[in-house]
Amino acid sequence: MNPNYSELRNGYLESIQKGMQTVRTLSGTISRGNGTKEERLKRLLEEIETAQAIVIGAGAGLSTSAGLTYSGEKFDQYFGDFSNRYGIRDMYSGGFYPFPDDETRWAWWSRHIYVNRYVYPPGSVYNTLLDLVKDKDYFVITTNVDHQFQKAGFDKERLFCTQGDYGLWQCSRPCHQRTYDNKGTVVKMLLSQGFAIGENSELIAPVMEDGKTDYASLSMKVPSGLVPYCPVCGEPMTMNLRSDDTFVEDESWHKASAAYAQFLQSHQDQHVLYLELGVGANTPVIIKYPFWHETLHNDKALYACLNLGEAFCPKEIEEKSICIDGDIADCFEE
């Protein structure tokens, strides 16, 4: 029997519903903000320093700014054999590829999981963000599944990862509402393919004399004994990533969702900074629209949007918004 979480508030659904209601009332006219970039950055710093509470909403653009990309050099280094055989061109599209068997699928996914979840990012944008807010009353809601907030040292009790975690597996049916840590098995999968794990958790591939990955020394399959199956019903395990209605919202998810609802309620009439970082157009209902709602309905609130090429706000909250078009890491340094 699935656990009953009916006594906990569902901040995820509550905020989405409020955001959608507010968007329907807006004129549809957008603003790119007022003032020079320097003036906007100065105002943002002042808001961070004076706000009674800060709600951080983070999307994929924040991790991109930290150097966590799904294509390019990292893809070529760890996935070149999959690219050559199956024509996969980046890690994102590879996550949807219909591999011929489970052994090949988990060879791909073990690499995908490890380099995006267990390897530290090249950039320090998450650490810089923590330095900016660590002494404030803050809460983080994110659609990112790469665990970077935890690795940077953010308080896990102030963090709501709405869309899952690369470090968790779940039953593919799912027959029960529980998730499972995967690091131990993922490392075994990688070692079985010919990779090594470095002292700083980096993934080390065998290389040729020219320094390029020696894919002839790597296997594109894991042993059948490492393929994960549900310990309850025996069905295959899958990633705990929200893609359809089989996504498992476990106990930790529900507690974080309730904590988010409580944080919003307890600060609803205070000077709150809703700081949106790298949220794109794919999932605006989870962070962007709820942040617009909270800003519109709280006279003391302010909305800030940092995004490369997508920094804007509704005209209705233009005077209560700071829109900064630029790379997030660069903006933090400035």
Image (spheres, rainbow, N blue to C red):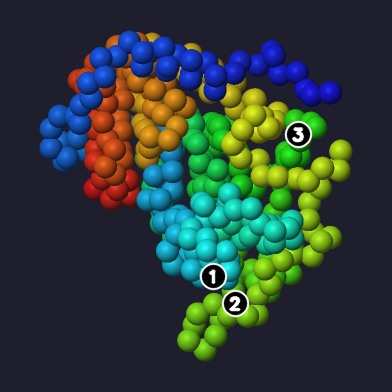
Q: Which residue is mark 3?
A: 174
Specify which label sits upstream in the sequence, 3 or 1.
1
Name the secondary structure under disc 3: loop
Viewer-proximal residue among 282 and 334: 282
Residue type pointed to by label 1 = Asn
Against 58, residue 113 (above or below) is below
- Residue 120 seen: no
Of tags 2 and 1, which is closer to the observer?
1
Q: Residue furthest bottom?
A: 209
* Crowding at mark 2 (Cα within 10 Å: few <14, some 14-19, many 20+): some
Q: Which residue is at 69% across, 13% downward?
A: 7
Which numbered tag is attached to residue 249?
Answer: none
Residue type pointed to by label 2 = Tyr
**How many marks overall?**
3
Q: Which residue is at 42% across, 17% downward?
A: 19
Q: Position of residue 84 (x, y in %)?
A: 54, 70
Q: Which residue is mark 2?
A: 215
Image quarter in which the N terminus is found: top right
Name the secondary structure under disc 1: helix
Viewer-proximal residue among 309 and 243: 243
Specify which label sits upstream in the sequence, 2 or 3.
3
Residue type pointed to by label 3 = Pro
Alpha carbon distance from label 2 to label 3: 35 Å
Q: Which residue is at 78% across, 22% downward?
A: 3
Q: Position of residue 209 (x, y in %)?
A: 52, 89
Q: Which residue is mark 1?
A: 84
